[in-house]
Image: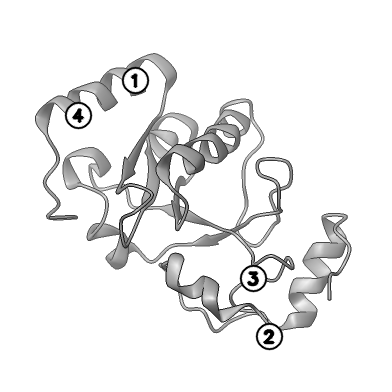
Amino acid sequence: MVGGMFIQPEVIATLRRRIAQEGWAMAGVGTGHAAITFVYTVGLQKNFAHPDLIMFGVAPAQAEGVIEVIAQRVKAGEPAHEGVMIVGAAEMPLMPRWADEERLRLLVPAQLARGRYRYLQVVWPDGKGRFPWESHFDKRRLRSQSFLFDLSGESDSQIEGKKKAAGIAARG
């Protein structure tokens, strides 16, 4: 069960130790073969005044490496911002989007969140660099990535402007 999600007490203890040592911790849910997999952080809000992170659709072992890079940047004073591309944390640019608090409550255990549900969802593009809210996004990728925000939103021209600002060439 998630949100009212059950999490083993020893897992909570391990995560809290990591938060005490590093200022933040990460938990993975599911395996590479599960219908839904995600990785999330706890501690970034409390210790670095930065939203925590959540990422779907990539096996936790892979996602953990990406989240680790982003969280270490946050710890070093380089925050992630909603709608601003993250480059260099993965083989492709990523886009953080504000996650809906009510949806998060179903996924992040209350005993870890402690009332802090400000999260950025790290979203990855399709093979051609298009994000799920852009036209011509490969819809087959929607099966593997859940969204904690409204997909209708930015226009293609807004996205292209952000890509140009991040130094990423448009891909057709």
Using the numbered discs, state the Cα–Cα distance from disc 1 to disc 3 in whole angstroms: 33 Å
Choose the circle earlier in sequence order: 1 or 3: 1
| Residue type, mark 2 in image | Ser
Q: CA distance from mark 4 to mark 1?
A: 11 Å
Q: Amino acid at mark 3?
A: Phe
Considering the numbered disc 4 on the image, is that residue within a helix, a strand or a loop?
A: helix
Where the C terminus falls, by quadrant? bottom right
Location of residue 71 with respect to 133 vertically, above or below: above
The Cα–Cα distance between marks 2 and 4, rounded to whole angstroms, is 41 Å
Residue ID for mark 3 = 131
Tag 1 secondary structure? helix
Residue 18 bears which disc, if any? 1
Q: Position of residue 147 (x, y in %)?
A: 43, 69
Residue placed under numbered mark 2 in the picture: 135
The answer to whether residue 53 is left or right of residue 36 is right
Residue flagged by tag 4: what amino acid is it?
Val
Say above or below: 167 vs 154: above
Marks 3 and 2 sit apart, C-alpha to C-alpha, by 8 Å
